[in-house]
Image: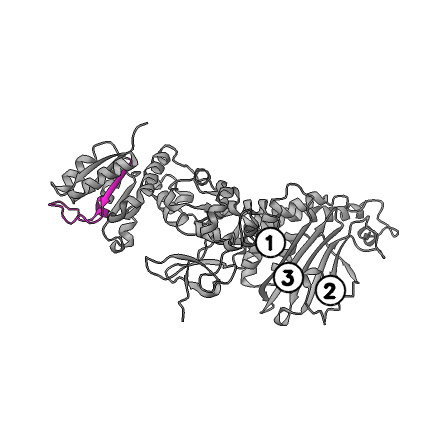
Amino acid sequence: MTKLQFKWIDDDPVRERAAITLGEALNVDVEFIDASLEDSTMNFSSFLEEQEPDLIIIDHNLADIKSGVFRKGSTVATYIRERWSDCPIISISGNIVEVDSQQRSLYVDLFPIERISDYYPNILSIAESFKDLKSRRPSNVEEFLELIGTPEDDKLNLITVLPTVLKHDFSNRSLLVEIAQWIKFVLLKRPGFLLSEIWVATLLGIKQSSFHKIENLFKKAEYQGYFANKNERRWWRSEILTIIYELVEEGTYPWEKGRYLDGIVDEDFSVCYSSDEPFPETVAFTDDTSEAIEVPIKLKYSYLHPGYESLLNFEDIRLMTPAE
Amino acid sequence: MKFPSHPSSAAFKQNELQTLQYINARARLLKDYTGLADAIRIAYLKYKSKKDNTFDFDFHVEFDMEVQENFHRVVVGAYVTGDFDMCTYFLAILGKDNEEVIRKYHFDYAKPSTPTNQPVPTYHLQYGGELSKHFENKKDTHLSSWLSVPRLLYTPVNLALLLDLMFCEFHTMDTKRVVQDVEWRCLILNNEQFLLKQYYSSIYQHINSGDYKKTNLIRDYCYN
């Protein structure tokens, strides 16, 4: 099988070592383009004459370019997209917090350079997903929903939350990038149709640390669609619910039923992070910093995160109420 | 047999499951009634896992909604057992502190072969009536729920038609949005065709048949 072809554009030649390491780790070919060496415009123009790669990695801050018009990776991304509209472009940065949302929107994703190896599974899934999407480009919303493995029960609800381009504009030039960004930044990020491990465990009334005991029962519910990767494991909520209701007669609600699963004992039952009360109804961030963790919590000890609006069919993003 | 077109209990329960599925798959329909939507989801999951239609359909939800310019706890329920051994739907409104039942209506299908103390309309509406298990710990001071009569002739009811009745009668901007929604109307159309079309058609046929005379009134036709 042909290896995936990556290009890495950077103005720091020292990072060529990181590019080689990435290539070896993921078993892909990585061509390092040192943007500090010559006129960047000429450099990028010539490489656009070559065959389109499976993924482009760009340093967000190209401050050390010797000449040329580009100073930001996002500008380079825009330039490349003119030619290769379906090419996934991701960015790396020493300080991703400083990248504004408009610049972010020009990349499929953005990763911190100092921990790039942590994100190898994410990077590989982006390249593989785009490669597959290019060969199976959906031509209508039903095909798109099939491609991501949407359960029957979710299809109509999912359609209501899709952006216009993914409902009506399948001839759009940037369709694949739109798909990628919606899956990565909405479907995978916002709990609703898909749930992360802590959300699934809380839904089933057990601790996240105990989920491994019953994980196999819910294998069928795991999201295996585009951009799935081991760093961002997700499960279809509707499938989780279908399975738990098929498996367990006792109890009414899923958080009651989960506790009847074989192997689950009292110590596995979820408790509120704030109060130790049983049956935390939701999950909240401990604070609004980037270091915050998600914890199971009773609704009364949390409040709506001011940075997120409520969305139909998605869970509210909440913050833990600080202790008085 | 009167109302020969009444669906079999299996088909009736299957239709209720389809109603739950239909609403569950269109979360936006009841986005202003999350308590009701959640109960429908739970009931859908519960009955979806049943492999046949021999299950007893037991649905119950309490949620708050605006009723004549005040918020009240509203109770909606359904209980369909066996081969229509029981087939009852109810709509109730709770009063102060949600402890007192101030209105309760039952919509029943009395299977013609079921023995009763007195003839009853096959499809009837009962004001008050016995408090079921869902109303444990609730007072019925003003309801006098021991009183079972009169049973008023009414049309057949199922979950979709009962919810529609509730949304139409407890009129607000939110309920108006529901009852005017194209997909909601589609659900109601399907359920009207499933239950009401044949009901009215049966009565029409009776009126136009030679059987319609003073010894066989519409009233007689509608009574078991």
Give the mark, 3 or 2, whose residue is nearer the N terminus: 3
Quadrant where the C terminus of chain A is found in the figure: bottom left
Outermost residue toward the top in this view: A1
Question: For the residues carrying marks 2 and 1, which lies nearer the camera in this image?
Answer: 1
Q: Quadrant of residue A25?
A: top left
Give the residue pinned by disc 2: B128
Question: Relative to residue A24, is residue B23 drawn left or right?
Answer: right
How dense is the environment of label 2, judged by Cα within 10 Å: few (below 14), some, or many (20 and up)?
Answer: many
Looking at the picture, which amino acid does disc 1 mark?
Answer: Thr
Question: Relative to residue A19, is residue B217 drawn left or right?
Answer: right
Give the residue pinned by disc 1: A252
Q: Main secondary structure of the magenta part?
A: loop
Give the residue pinned by disc 3: B75
Is residue B186 in view? no
Residue B130 is situated, as x and y percent measured from the top left of the image, at 75, 62
Q: Which residues are magenta?
A: A54-76
Looking at the picture, which amino acid does disc 3 mark?
Answer: Val
For disc 1, the chain is A
Query: What is the C-alpha distance between the residues marked 2 and 1?
Result: 28 Å
Helix, strand or loop at mark 2: loop
Question: Relative to residue B177, is residue A167 drawn left or right?
Answer: left
